[in-house]
Image (cartoon, rainbow, N blue to C red):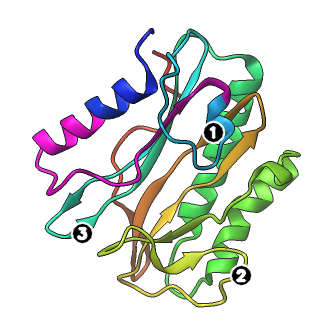
Amino acid sequence: MGVTEKELSAKLVCYMTQEGADAQPNGILLISGPRTSLLHGVASSKAIEYGDFVLMDYGAMVDGYHSDMTRTVCVGQPSEKMQQVYNIVLKAQAAGIDGAKPGITGREMDKLARDIIDEAGYGDAFGHSLGHGVGLEIHEFPNASPATQTKLEAGNVVTVEPGIYLSGEFGVRIEDFVVIRENGCENLTKAPKQLLVL
């Protein structure tokens, strides 16, 4: 506690570069507390406080290829509502990953996760698509979104990143990226996803 979002973001960039990233990553999002309800918030001078969610959306580039992941962790004990929302997002993400296979459309994949969030009463708080292609660009085709009728094919790499964002309270996003295989998908993101309490 006490470290600012900007300081923690700088440490994350330094770590990735030391570990072999080709260049300084672009578009790192690192926000905390009520600011985690911002879809595209950037690191600020806000100090991280006890009870805050910290949302980190980042990736490295190696040999010209991008990666992308998001984790939401809690500094101190989360409230019951924070735990509940986190578990809904985790369940929605699992549904999206389980459905990622050749022949599914982006729209169908998005719906697998979106239905879980809708049924939990937070449909209006999921304001973006489930995922996007990632490779030589950080955002590329194909997308997993309500508007995408294109079918996924073996070899496609897409993110699976549902979220719930409650204005003025907190937000949760969990993002992995997967490669579509002949019989399903392979999750390329190895970081644990159970809620980490620091």
Left or right: residue 90 compared with residue 56: right
Q: Amino acid at mark 3?
A: Tyr
Splitting the image into 4 quarters, where does residue 95 fall?
bottom right
Q: Image point 50% across, 51% down: which residue?
A: 175
| Residue hosting label 1 | 172
Q: Image point 20% across, 36% down: which residue?
A: 14
| Residue hosting label 3 | 65
Residue 127's x, y, as percent? Answer: 74, 57
Q: Amino acid at mark 2?
A: Ala
| Residue hosting label 2 | 147
Splitting the image into 4 quarters, where does residue 112 fall?
bottom right
Left or right: residue 164 compared with residue 156: right
| Numbered disc 2: secondary structure | loop
14 inside magenta stretch: yes
Q: CA distance from mark 3 to mark 1?
A: 26 Å
- The crowding category of the residue bearing disc 2, from other C-alpha atoms within 10 Å (few below 14, some 14 to 19, many at least 20), is few
- Residue in the foreground of this view, choosing between 184 and 138: 138
Classify 193 as above or below 116: above
- The magenta segment is 12-34
Residue 33's x, y, as percent? Answer: 62, 24
- Residue in the foreground of this view, choosing between 195 and 139: 139
Q: Image point 27% across, 29% down: which residue?
A: 11
Classify 122 as above or below 146: above
Instruction: Say whether marks 2 and 1 touch (CB < 8 Å).
Output: no
Splitting the image into 4 quarters, where does residue 79 fall?
top right
Q: CA distance from mark 2 to mark 1?
A: 23 Å
Q: Earlier in the sequence, mark 3 or mark 1?
A: 3
